[in-house]
Amino acid sequence: MNYNQNLLLIKDHFPNTDFISEEDFSLFDNEQFAKKVFNYLCESVDNINNKLQLNIHFGFRFNRTFNATAYHKEDVNIIIVNHGLINQIEPIIENSLKTFLKEGFTVSSGFPIDKNVLMELFVYLISSYLFYHELGHIIQFNFSKEEGIATFNEEYSSSEYKEKNHM
């Protein structure tokens, strides 16, 4: 199923949510970065759906907060990623790479380090973490005995993230 078909299915469950279609990726601060994350998420969804038949769909929501959310509704599993999360991750990676490349060990190691290769690695690792983190919630929901819609996200009333609230 392609991304736009995913969005149609998701919109059936969340009709008042503002999703970002592939044609609207210019809404991201860095469209190229968003497409890289998008490609990794598509691969991950296809891979897990083929292996576990969990009927997972994902979409990017136009929302500036740093968040992603997993939902289980009837026989559908949905991961919604806020575009604010994607917009905020890229500068964090950029700053981390700049710091890493200036570190004494990195400079004195003499190893040739390609910033683009490191960026690709970070995009892969972060996209993988994002997907598998939300997949963990979907698996929890699928083994839950509760009926109806199940959701879990990291939006807290306080601005401080507390791991114990997440567990």
Image (cartoon, rainbow, N blue to C red):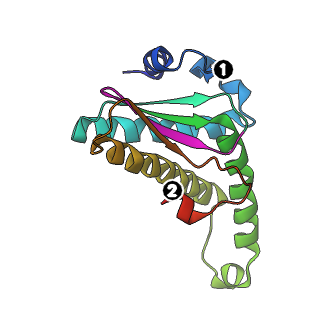
Point out which mark residue 61 bears.
none
Mark 1 lies on residue? 24
Mark 2 or mark 1, earlier in chain: 1
Q: Which residues are magenta?
A: 65-76
> Where does the image place residue 49, in percent across and percent down from the top left?
29, 35
Q: Amino acid at mark 1?
A: Asp
Q: Residue at 49% x, 54% y: name it.
A: 129
Q: Residue at 59% x, 49% y: name it.
A: 154
> Where does the image place residue 18, in percent across and percent down from the top left?
64, 20
Q: Residues within 10 Å of mark 1 (few under 14, many from 20)?
A: few
Decide if residue 150 is on the left or right side of residue 161: left
Nearest to the observer: residue 53 or residue 72: 72
Q: Residue at 72% x, 26% y: name it.
A: 27
Nearest to the observer: residue 7 or residue 36: 7
The vertical placement of 3 against 85, above or below, is above
Tag 2 secondary structure? helix
Q: Residues within 10 Å of mark 2 (few under 14, many from 20)?
A: some
The vertical placement of 6 against 124, above or below, is above
The vertical placement of 119 against 50, above or below, is below
Nearest to the observer: residue 148 or residue 33: 148
Decide if residue 68 is on the left or right side of residue 115: left
Q: Amino acid at mark 2?
A: Leu
Mark 2 lies on residue? 125
> Where does the image place residue 112, in percent across and percent down from the top left?
61, 71
Label pair 2/1, CB-CB below 8 angstroms: no
> Where does the image place residue 15, in percent across and percent down from the top left?
55, 15
- Whether residue 87 appears in magenta in the rendering, the answer is no
Nearest to the observer: residue 38 or residue 117: 38
